[in-house]
Amino acid sequence: MADSSRKIRSVTPSRDLDISLIMEDLVAEVLQGSVRAMARLIAVVENEDPRSFEFLGSIYPHTGRAHVLGITGSPGTGKSTLTDKITSVLRRQEKTVGVVAVDPSSPFTGGALLGDRIRMQRASGDPDVFIRSMATRGNLGGLARTTADVIKIMDGFGKDWVIVETVGVGQDEVEIAKTADTTIVVLAPGLGDAIQSMKAGVMEIADLYVINKADRSGADALVTEVRIRVEQDAQIKKAAWRAPVLKTVAVEDQGTEPLLEAIESHRSFLEESGRLKKVRREKTRQETLSLLKEEISRNVLEKILGNGRFDDLIDDIIAHRKDPYTSVKEIVGTIFPDEE
Amino acid sequence: MADSSRKIRSVTPSRDLDISLIMEDLVAEVLQGSVRAMARLIAVVENEDPRSFEFLGSIYPHTGRAHVLGITGSPGTGKSTLTDKITSVLRRQEKTVGVVAVDPSSPFTGGALLGDRIRMQRASGDPDVFIRSMATRGNLGGLARTTADVIKIMDGFGKDWVIVETVGVGQDEVEIAKTADTTIVVLAPGLGDAIQSMKAGVMEIADLYVINKADRSGADALVTEVRIRVEQDAQIKKAAWRAPVLKTVAVEDQGTEPLLEAIESHRSFLEESGRLKKVRREKTRQETLSLLKEEISRNVLEKILGNGRFDDLIDDIIAHRKDPYTSVKEIVGTIFPDEE
């Protein structure tokens, strides 16, 4: 935190006593299209700086315009290349693009740095593509919360599309996928775990399936298998949307244009069926709840547990003079006095 | 929750109006050694029933005696078989054993049920081995919190050892590993990701390494590689404990006895160096914090967000009449009035 405020200070040295004013300036710069200001605000969010609430509040009225596209799949399915190619198609349509590449598989920083370097190369030269890699940072809100905030900054900046690229299909990824309007699940022949992973919640989040590396043997069988599952699932749930299954060879840019048409179809479906409203309402609800929990946790840590009182309590618990459950009930009783 | 209380009611039908008394009875039964009562209390904990706080408080004074052994490793390393064999050695020493098999890779229930069936077979016939499989349930506290509570129930019941078996090395697993006194990381030759996974935080949690399936080619090379890493890491951190690297062939029960001796050595080290106290203090601190956050979240959901007020707020946020960040600050301001 000290680090990020130092960086911010160096931008406007004359106002270094009033962080709020500096934040206001940065927000104004973001809304005017400053990439540098956007990168700075994202860093503040990633560091879980409590001041991020202030400027995110100022950016919020300018959000809700970008279409958020989630791209998820196991390592080796080629989803980074696919993200690249989709970005290229969008750029040919003169749309601006923000990419958030989330890599929770490396909780100990190294991964995202390497990723950043690789992805920098992809983006080089196009000022209308902004790419940010993120690994897990901090504890308060988790990766899903930070990702949601970064999407909002890119959205408020004016990006037409924000692409969120995630690895794998763990719980974190399912959470993150819920921040997208349209989610693509990328599979590839020969990885073995495709159908396996479909059991673990993928059906819940996929709006489109892409069988990438479709020039490999086994691609058509995989397409058929996924289509059967989608059909079964849609019948059980009486779903209005049936996830299409498309083939691509991303490295050779094959199938990218039809994929984008399918994405646009899903977008139209969301808007015309009224589902976009429902989806975004649920998203807003979840995000606001997460914010609330995070902010309460921060206050508990700072105020309830300050002054060594918490350490005394832990001593009592370890000595079995108190138990953690009753003690927690008591503390919470002081915060919510009507607690029976 | 309705389900679990129904189950409890059917045990003591004459008192079905007073759940607290029934809980007291169940706790008394657990402390007297009733396996059925233990299974019921674990179910209440898994369902995140708020009443679990009451009986966990009553059980807490009877905890702290079991040695908690964590066993973690990627799928295919054979850690379930290893858990079985370690359990057998402990049983030959007339120790009682509880096993918590955590499978967060299947967030959508199916996995744990299957696991239960497989593991039931392992345990059949020995009343002094209690095995419980768990997948992710609920949202409030997460798997690490629930696992910690289940360990406490088994500990309070009187198990000499509680073994926590987890899959993989994601963030959840690192969290769960922190609930153990001694953590074994299981690797196997030929899986490829062994050294890869060691980068991602495994060094932080491993007290012992086991190279299982050591009759396969590549085992000795893997042992050497891991030993070098342990040595480097120990020198950097000036660690008092150097994680030993042992070879086993669990399916043939080779190497299990030496492994148990190594576990006992680590246990002695923890006790004699005073580290057990430190480790358990940190565990107690983390668990109490998690409890606190969970209980506050529950209260916020029930009291602050009741009466449709939260839905009204979401309407305002979606219409951009309010922003989530400022709104959350306001709500938290009413809970913590001295919030500046």
Image (cartoon, coloured by chain):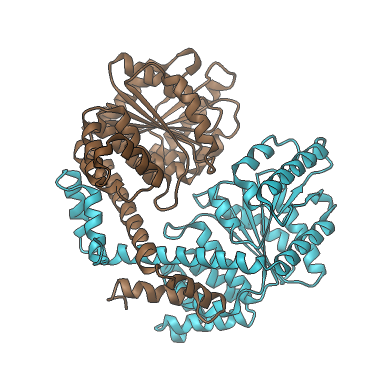
Chain colours: A cyan, B brown
State the image coordinates of residue B320 (x, y, percent, origin top left): 55, 79
The residue lying at 32 percent from left, 50 percent from top is B286
Left or right of A292, for residue A112: right
Instruction: Using the image, determine if residue B122 lies above or below residue A245.
Output: above
Question: In the figure, residue B89 lies in which quadrant?
Answer: top left
Front one among B198 and B32:
B32
Instruction: Using the image, determine if residue B129 lies above or below residue B6.
Output: above
How many numbered marks, from 0 up? 0
List the single residue furthest toward the bottom. Answer: A14
State the image coordinates of residue A318 (x, y, percent, origin top left): 20, 44
List the single residue furthest toward the left. Answer: A321
List the single residue furthest toward the front. Answer: B14
- Is there any visible trace of residue B237 in the rendered image? no
Q: Quadrant of the N terminus of chain A?
A: bottom left
Front one among B42 and A49:
B42
Left or right of B258, for residue A81: right
Instruction: Using the image, determine if residue B63 lies above or below residue A117.
Output: above
Front one among A234 and A42:
A234
Left or right of A71, for residue A141: left
Front one among A277 and B105:
A277
The residue lying at 53 percent from left, 43 percent from top is B107
State the image coordinates of residue A266 (x, y, percent, origin top left): 74, 61
The residue lying at 27 percent from left, 33 percent from top is B155
- Is there any visible trace of residue B26 in the rendered image? yes
Instruction: Using the image, determine if residue A125 lies above or below residue A171.
Output: below
Question: In the figure, residue A128 lies in which quadrant?
Answer: bottom right
State the image coordinates of residue A18 (x, y, percent, origin top left): 41, 84
Question: In the figure, residue B264 lies in which quadrant?
Answer: top left
Q: Quadrant of the C terminus of chain A?
A: bottom left
Left or right of B22, for residue B49: right
